[in-house]
Each structure stands twice: as structure tokens, then as C-alpha cells.
Image (cartoon, helix red, strand yellow):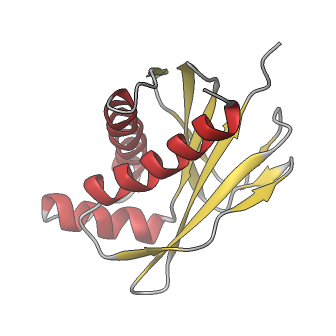
Amino acid sequence: MDKAANVQKVLNATISSLTTVIPIKFEVLSPSMIKQPYEQREISVLIGLIGNMKGRLIVEPTHTTIGKIGQAMFGMNIEGEMAESFTGELGNMIAGNLCTILEKESLTLDISPPTVLTGNTKFFGFQQAFKIPVKFEDGELLNLLLTIDEER
């Protein structure tokens, strides 16, 4: 299977995973290619992907979005240190579900433990990434970034 087909499978499975995990209505906007550095706004979770392809999944919500997702999932407001912890767990749920979906497509990926980053942070260390903006009904955006590492 070629790299482009694998990338397309991962992108489709990422969107499918997000739909399964997040119980709030949203619209997936058009993906775009970005180059480094990528500058996050508030908070994100980075999860390494390894297996049939190698890369990283970065889920970048806002604190407001994390609060609303927590409210929808658990019936309680998520803020402070709990928001940071939940952001990591949300990334873990999305990436874990992504791997399960891809297994059915004969693409095997394993994930690393989540790394939560807070504040205004720049990401380096990738040549290109796919950015998938997700817009919620209240106008809040969650960005998904998928970096694909070059095979050596």
C-alpha cells in the first residue's frame, strides 16, 4: 500500500474517531497542509503514532471546548488541572479509537502515552502536517494535526 493511501486512511479514521468520541455536534472543515512551526493557542495533546506509518496526532482544543466536551460526557464542568488531565484523556480516546478503526483497514498503529502542552507553544520537528479544523455549533474550533514522518 502506498503512503498516500495510508495517509488518506489515517485522516478518514481520525475524523471517524472524533465523531465517535465527542458527543457534541460539529462540522469538519476542509483539511490543509501546514509547515513548521505550528503555534498552538492554549492547550493541546500530542500522541506519537508508530507502526505501518510513523507520525504524531496533535489535538488542539480550547479551554472552552474542553469544558463543553466534559460537560456533555460527564455532566460536570472541567477546568484547571482537571482540564489538562482531561485533554490528555481525550487525545488518548481519539488516538485509541483511531487505531481500532485502522485495524479493520489492515493498517496497524500503536500510540504513545499522551503529552499535554499548555500555553502558547510552537511545534517543530516535522516537514509537513495535515491540519483538520473542527467547528462546533458555538463557533469554537478544535484543530487536529497529523504529522507524517518520512521513512528513512
Q: Position of residue 33 (x, y in %)?
A: 77, 57
Residue 97 located left or right of residue 140: left
Residue at position x 69%, y 52% from top?
Answer: 130
Q: Position of residue 80 (x, y in %)?
A: 40, 55
Residue 19 located left or right of residue 8: left
In this view, which residue lies farthest toward the bottom?
138
Residue at position x 48%, y 51% from top?
Answer: 12
Q: Is residue 147 above or below residue 31?
A: above
Q: Is residue 140 above or below residue 146?
A: below
Q: Is residue 74 above or below residue 57?
A: below
In this view, which residue lies farthest toward the top?
152
Q: Position of residue 117 (x, y in %)?
A: 60, 42
Q: Position of residue 66 (x, y in %)?
A: 39, 62
In this view, which residue lies farthest toward the left?
75
Q: Quadrant of the N terminus?
A: top right
The image quarter containing residue 15 is: bottom left
Total labels: the figure holds 0
Q: Nearer the viewer, residue 71 or 11?
A: 11
Q: Nearer the viewer, residue 3 or 82?
A: 3
Residue at position x 51%, y 42% from top?
Answer: 9
Q: Nearer the viewer, residue 118 or 124?
A: 124
Q: Quadrant of the C terminus?
A: top right
Residue 26 located left or right of residue 133: left
